[in-house]
Structure formats: structure tokens, C-alpha cells
Image (cartoon, rainbow, N blue to C red):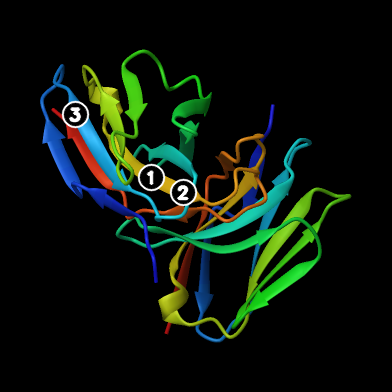
Amino acid sequence: KNEVEQSPQNLTAQEGEFITINCSYSVGISALHWLQQHPGGGIVSLFMLSSGKKKHGRLIATINIQEKHSSLHITASHPRDSAVYICAGGGGSQGNLIFGKGTKLSVKP
Amino acid sequence: EPEVTQTPSHQVTQMGQEVILRCVPISNHLYFYWYRQILGQKVEFLVSFYNNEISEKSEIFDDQFSVERPDGSNFTLKIRSTKLEDSAMYFCASSDVGQGNNEQFFGPGTRLTVL
């Protein structure tokens, strides 16, 4: 069964701190998506990775295919980064996503 | 920038009633999805749709659920006889490629409350 596990579940940081969120996934997942969910509920796609590393502004996502592990890093965190960050595996042939439980990040000023 | 839209943003209904949740995917996208998120839980896949038919569905997507693309723009999710446990946020998503390694664009969600 395809599964996605995230850690930590909750994360509190001070503004400016470097943040790492981890995700492990099972066999059968061909790509890893990182998503951001705001308090209102809306979901925004941040990255899609099948290998290597991607960077967008202060966000960096990496994936290790052999270890089936991905990380999302936020450099110089800011209170506006406060949200739930979700990793999701692309496991189905039709592209449906398998979601992790999410990491609730709170960045204090 | 093109976006996925969903209506209504919030729907309140009585148990046993039928509801239709509407989505307008991004216009050149071909693959459409419904997901749901029960409060406090993770997002779960319901169904994927391509070429006017269901391509994959989860165990959650039982006979009470149906999807339709009634015209060239709308994509709907119908729940025939709602139950209390159907209360959740329902997200529509679309992508231009159906493989799991392509970005999906999510709508803002419809919060369904079943009383």
C-alpha cells in the first residue's frame, strides 16, 4: 500500500530560523509533491520532485530516491510562512495524490 | 494567472439530501480530481476523471458519489444522500498531464456541513 509519512507534526520556530520538514514514502510513488495549506483551507502547490533538488525563493526541496525520503527547507523563516505543509506522493497511474498528515508550522516574530 | 474555481465556498445541508459541488478546472487541463479533507485529518483522494470517464476511484467513492463533466467547463461532484460523516472540505484539482509526476492545481475548496 502506498503511504506517505511526515515529521514533525507540529513545528514552532522563531523568525529567521532555518526549518526542515521531512517526508518518507513507500515503494510505488513516482514523484513527491510539497504543498502549502493556509488557515482558510486553500492548497497551493510548492514543488514537484522526482529527483534532485529544487529551489524557489527561500524554499528548497530535496529528494533521495534510494532512501525514499524528501525534505522541505525554509531559510530565514518569517511569520507569513506559518501554514500547514503537506507532502504528497504521486502514486497512481492517473496522477492521484497520496497525502501525508501535514506539518503545522508556526513562525513567531 | 489561470486558476481552478469552486462553488459554493460553503454548503450546509440536511442529512439525506443531495448536494452538488461544482468546479471549473483550468481551461486547457484534461485530468480532473476530487479530494476531501475531514476536519483535522489528512487530505484523501476520491476520484480522478479523464476523457469523460472515471479513471480511478478510492474506497471512499461509493455508490453515493458520482462525478460529471456536463459541459466543456464544469466538473461536478454529486453526493446522492448525504451522511453526517460526509462533512468535510472538498477540493477539486486539475492537471494537464495525468501522471503522478505532474503538478496539480487546486481549487479553494467547498466546505460541506451535513446536519
Q: Tell if the residue under mark 1 belongs to the same chain as the one under mark 3.
A: yes
Estimate the spatial distance between the alpha carbons at disc 2 and disc 1, rounded to whole Å: 7 Å
Residue in the image at 36% along x and 37% along y? B38
Front residue of this view, candidates A18 and B85: B85
Residue B92, above or below B105? above
Question: Residue B4's x, y, as percent?
Answer: 36, 56
The residue marked by circle 1 belongs to what chain? B
| The disc label shown at residue B92, or none | 1
Q: Is residue B102 left or right of residue A10?
A: right
The residue marked by circle 2 belongs to what chain? B
Are circles 2 and 1 on residues that touch, CB within 8 Å?
yes
Q: Which residue is mark 2?
A: B94
Mark 3: which secondary structure?
strand
Estimate the spatial distance between the alpha carbons at disc 1 and disc 3, rounded to whole Å: 15 Å
Question: Residue A34's x, y, as percent?
Answer: 59, 58
Say whether disc 1 or disc 3 marks the residue closer to the N-terminus. Answer: 3
Q: Is residue B5 left or right of residue B26?
A: left
Q: Which residue is mark 3?
A: B19
What amino acid is found at the position of numbered circle 3 in the picture? Val
